[in-house]
Amino acid sequence: MTARGWAFFLARRLAVLALLLVVVSFAVFSLLYLSPGSVIDTLLGTNPRTPAELSYLTSEYHLNQPFLTQYWIWASQAVRLHFGNSIQTSLPVTSEIRQRLPVSLFLGVYAYILTVLLGVGLGIAAALRRQRLADRGIVGAAIVALSTPAFVSGVFLIYLLGIQVRLFPVAGPGTGFFGELWHLTLPAVALALTATAYLVKHTRAAVIGVLDQDYVTFARARGLTASRVLTGYILRNALIPVVTMSGLILSYVITGAVLVEDTFSLPGIGQLLVQSATAKDLPLIQGVAMVIAVVIVLANLLADVALMAVDPRIRLGRGSR
Amino acid sequence: MKPRRAATLAAATVALLSMGLAACSATSTPPSALANAPGTNAVIPQLTIGDDAAIPTLNPDKTADTVGAYGALESLIKFGPTGQIEPALAASVTQPNPATYVYHLRQGVTFWDGDPMTSADVVNALNYEREPGSEISSHFTGVKSVTTDGPYTVTVTLDQPNATWESQVATFVVIFEKKFQQEHPATMGQPGVLIQGTGPLVIDSFDPTTGLQLSANPHWWGGQVLVKHVMVKLFSSETDEALAFRAGEIDAAHDVLNPRSFVSASGANLVSTPAFSEGYFGMNYEIAPWNNIHVRRAVAYALNRSDIIAALGNKAEPVTTLIPPNQLTQLGSQAQISALVNSLPSYPYSIAKAKAELAQSPYPHGFTATAITIDFGAYTPINEAIAADLAKIGITLKLKLVSFNQYIDNLTGPRTLGGTYLTFNVISPDPSSFPSALLGASNLAAGGWNYANYNPAAMNTLLAEGTATLDTGKRLAIYTQMLKMLANDEPYVPLFIQDYNIALSSKYTLPGYTVWDELGAWVIDIRQAR
């Protein structure tokens, strides 16, 4: 692909991202507006309330303004990257997200690495030993993992490795690289299990599909080594759908860890989203929704770029120039 | 209050696992009675306490109760072991007239940074907490002025005498350094900025995502603090907290709301005390079929408090009055309060009497109604126990699970709910606190908690009179009248007073723990077990 082609490709993706952010922000704003409960109730709880207090809070959070005006007030600040302050903590939304994002990114990347290593590795192993005991064992384990929600496997891991063996901590994110690695191992495994199972099944199916191709038979007939056939002929073709899927997996493990973060009391983006939704903390919900949308788009962009790198048909195809 | 459907699903898994834990655990759970036995006076170098309540900021107009509980911030006065008012930062209080309080400050008290506490700090803190932007400003509505007559004298003048004022000061007021607040006008209480207080534990660090670090204040006016370092670790849910307790990662857990599942999963000892948290079944005074007095009395007879308390894990005491006895004792002796309670019309559990009452209503064979519930604490098992009791007299209560926000919206919004269970918590121990939240015209407006829609004119008069006099005898007479009226009309069926529970490692003890300790710095009262 030419430089111009790359620029056009990226510009198109960024335009899609901008449009997506507008749609997501408006949809989230509308849903929150329609949902029951009031931020004032959340803030004051069972405390008695005075007219002066109600008037102050109503004005402070623009609750007396029409819906579209409220959205416009938020959007006009957001385009200048001012997402406001959290209603609960009074901290800027950006600093709240900055505090939480590293935990989610660490957990997500850790789980992603585990997913790819285990998913692709076991998928290939199962395909190469098709219909044998190892294949049946891997496929059976994948079905169990697919059927186990992350919070259930999380609790099981806590029980086994946190309480019985006491090998890993059961809550909190830890500090420092190795502290985080130690604390986030169980959550990463819990988060990776389901995605790994998907990847095992996809990789296995893709490799089996390629194993039966004529060009693989021909390569073997030419006397090429097994490793050369595997890397140069089988994986290069079989991993194309796996690379496509990996973008979805990356966005899932970074943004979809709500239950795992809850199970292990991890202060990540998912937990922040749940807390802010419960408290109707609109600026924070909007900020988190924007981050999630950006992560999803960027993860898919990365997957597409990776796909172009491994598949010349896409790189040189229509619209690439 | 944090509803978590996921947490409940996780809790179910934990419950299954905990059966295994109970079966294979080598160390059996010590009896919980040991948890409040006398301890030693040895220094405790480090305590780790779990909490699943959010601490979004240290700003005292938002989270004074939580931070106060951890012994960081103090008030002018405090509650003693039996609920009597005792001096704290004010060495004494005088009252030149019923609407004026003069606080004579303790001299020699310093903030954590070493600066002395003076009347300027106290005046500034009181004014800060009563500004309209403060979430606790409603507790200061009757304050006319806060002035100072010298470096150690502060005068608070009220619009009119207010019997709740002292309780409000002991519960909600916290004193912080004026200089620090003025240096950080918009950021006081935030992580990295913190706050300057006088309490026995100094706040060293704060992160709303992970918790607090505190250390003993070596210059505390109250003497030596035996607990040297405290880490407050925040959890997403009580289930996570229980598992961390089981894994030995925390020494104590604060405010256990679902004691049965917590003990099952954690194996912890609980230290419990009746709290100011009362469970009610409220019935709409204006909407059929609940507006019929015979229906309400039938419900009152049909509800078996023992069953309902069992659903809660037996960590509660049955009550029959909207104002719980542990608040009424502020106005009279135990004997007087017992006599008062016994003199009220009562509805002891009796299916026969319930059926007889229902037979006098237009619904002699019962009816079907829908009640909302939430996935939080023990709400679901309690509602199921209530529905089972009502089914015995022909009332079919269909339970509808709603989100937390929907629940609050229904309770405090338009008065359309029929029969609904609610556990209502108050922080102030004054006997007016439950009636002034759940009854009367002022609580019928949006945001008010009078979900039984109960608003007789006589009740509004009693509500006003109850706080306008400082004479405890007169107040007792007013609240007796109020309770009689409620017992006759029965808009709310009082069910139980829930215990306040602290889970404690067997290494520690919390001797003599009462609800009054919970309103103060209970953490520094933890002792090493003998």
Image: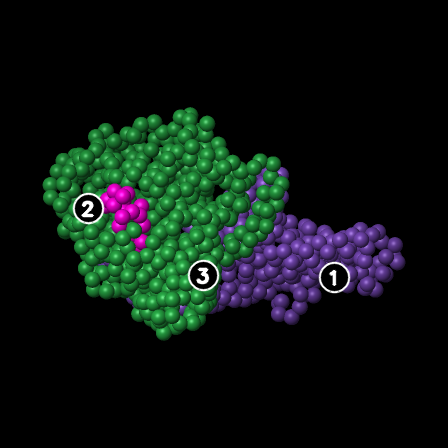
Chain colours: A purple, B green
Measure the C-alpha gap from mark 2 to mark 1. 81 Å
Query: How packed is label 3: few (under 14 Cα within 10 Å), some, or many (20 or more)?
Result: many
Q: Nearer the viewer, residue A42 or A225?
A: A42
Q: Are marks 2 and 3 on the same chain?
A: yes
Measure the C-alpha gap from mark 3 to mark 1. 57 Å
Mark 3 or 1: the one toward you: 3
* Residue drawn at 28 percent across, 55 percent down: B344
Type of residue at label 2?
Answer: Thr
Position of residue B427 measured from the top left corner of the image (x, y, whole percent): 32, 48
- Work out whether B515 lies above or below B282: above
Disc nearer the start of the sequence (2/3): 3
- What chain letter is assigned to the residue under label 2? B
What residue range appears in magenta? B321-340
Taking the view exactly as shown, the residue that stands out farthest to the left is B96
* Residue drawn at 53 percent across, 45 percent down: B264
Type of residue at label 3?
Answer: Asp
Mark 2 or 3: the one toward you: 3
Position of residue B387 measured from the top left corner of the image (x, y, whole percent): 45, 62
> In screen coordinates, is A315 left or right of A180?
right
- Mark on residue B389? 3
Q: Secondary structure at mark 1?
A: helix
Type of residue at label 1?
Answer: Ala
Q: Which residue is mark 1?
A: A205
Q: Are marks 3 and 1 on the same chain?
A: no
Is B300 colored magenta in this rendering?
no
Q: Nearer the viewer, residue A19 or A97?
A: A97
